[in-house]
Amino acid sequence: MSLTSDSHAPKRATRKSADASRRAVEQAPEAGPPQGNPFGPRFVAPLYLGASLNPVNSTVIATALVAIAAALHLPVGDTAILISSLYLTSALAQPAAGRLAEEFGPRRIFVAGIVLVLVAGVVGSLAQSLTGLIVARVLIGAGTSAGYPAAMLLIRRRAEQAGHHAPPRTVLGGLSITGAATVAVGPAIGGLLVGTLGWRTAFWINLPVGAIALVLALAGIARDPDPVRFGSPRALASRIDLLGMVGFGGSLTALMVFLSSLPRPNWLWLAAAAVLGAAVVAWELRAAQPFLDVRLLASNGALTRTYARNGLTLMGTYVILYGLTQWLQVARGLSPYEAGLILMPMGVLTAVTARSVSKRAGVRMPLIGCAVLLLVGAVAVLFVSSGTPIAVIIAITVVFGLTSGTGSVANQTVLYQESPAATVGTASGLLRTFGYVGSIASAAITGTAFHSGVDDGGLHVIAWVLVAISALVVLMTVFDSHLARTDRRHAN
């Protein structure tokens, strides 16, 4: 009997040691309820800064394209790939980063994303060819994509640790406000830096900003309590649904290439997108841990409508942002800097509106207001011509600023309320993906409308398309009875 007991003693000791280690991790200060204000500056500052890295890189590069083309002896049109490469990478990487955050811990993925941005900053600063710059932009897109979905998951877990039903609305709103403020001042700051220090500023700006974000994240965000478990490559691929990620990425890439081919559509790419999309749906329906939970999207209409509403709203906003910018420069003869100044109030008001909406308790009325404002702005553009006073044009852009600020915060709030707690990272990434698809679609609409020339007629074509988009958003919002029930549920 004693022999049997002695033979099992090492095993029991090993189990006790493992249990003790697990309890130590679970009882570590980082995993316990946060002391004081759980959403103080120490916690939210790195989240906001990390989430702003993507819009920083989206806006600053626009001011450097001409200088990059001159330095590399390329046509300016060839440098447009530096914009599309980041958008495409971000559209694919946002939900993937969310899924990885759910699997390996949001803090780890958040920090890994910042480190990747730092590497990209070095690569871009030293690159001597367009290929090298494209590699840097892809790395930037992948690294900055971790910020938003990981931040949403960190906020959710923080609220649960503090025993809160939900975080303060201003905390979620801060993510939208930071992005909107960055977009508002990004072109002006980028133009100043690039004009003073050269085009490589668009890449090495990531080094100081990323370093500050990394220090703040390591100091202010508690460590993930669960240890990393990789397992076999096959088991890991199954847990993160690697095949689903790849299929989703392929389908989305094909769709974006098709949209970019307009107004001369390449139908083969649309067919490829449809075939790959059908294959992804079939795979995800039988995947044990699906990356894209098709059943959830089919059963959770509120979440699916939020994705569609957000994508359509951003499509309408970007149609004006891209279309009006080109029209101001060509039809009105303004410089890029002057056109940027005219659009700056739109970005500033987006940030101001986002802050105001984040303090409201309900989402239905802000979303209805957003949809109606989008329609009002679209109708107003129908009456714009080359003789319209600049003050009137600025007033119209202000309407779209109100739309953007209201919609971004309200849709983000609905997403947080409707997505399952365990998958809020992936769900948040998908919200951004729909936004990127909307922005690329808006570029295709603008290109088609201005195909024969940038003039008043093309601007009015854009306006009519926008009227149709905004009317659809109005109908989707006004007749969505779930929004009213959501407001009542969270008011109690």
Image (spheres, rainbow, N blue to C red):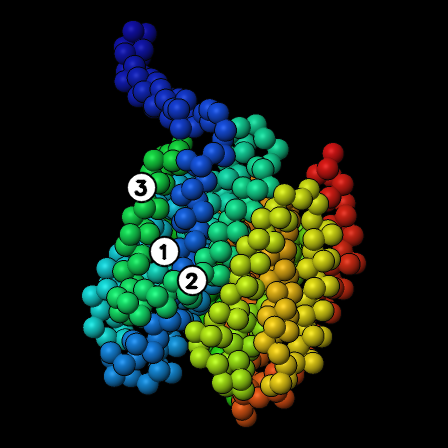
Density class for disc 1 (Cα within 10 Å; few <14, some 14-19, many ≥20) is many
Residue indicated by mark 2: 186
Q: Earlier in the sequence, mark 1 or mark 2?
A: 1
Q: Where is residue 140 shown, x and y percent of the image? A: 35, 60
Tally of numbered tags: 3
Q: What SS does tag 3 mark?
A: helix
| Residue found 74% across the figure and 34% down from its top | 492
Residue indicated by mark 3: 215
Query: Tags 3 and 2 in contact by the CB under 8 Å rule?
Result: no
Distance from disc 3 to disc 2, alpha carbons, whole Å, reads 23 Å
Q: Where is residue 306 shown, x and y percent of the image? A: 64, 56
| Residue found 55% across the figure and 78% down from its top | 323
Q: Which mark is residue 143?
A: 1
Q: Which mark is residue 112?
A: none
Disc number lying in front (3 or 2): 2
Q: Amino acid at mark 1?
A: Gly
Q: What SS does tag 1 mark?
A: helix
Q: Nearer the viewer, residue 234 or 135?
A: 135
* Quadrant in the picture for residue 204: bottom left
Query: Tags 1 and 2 in contact by the CB under 8 Å rule?
Result: no
Q: Amino acid at mark 3?
A: Val
Distance from disc 1 to disc 2, alpha carbons, whole Å, reads 19 Å
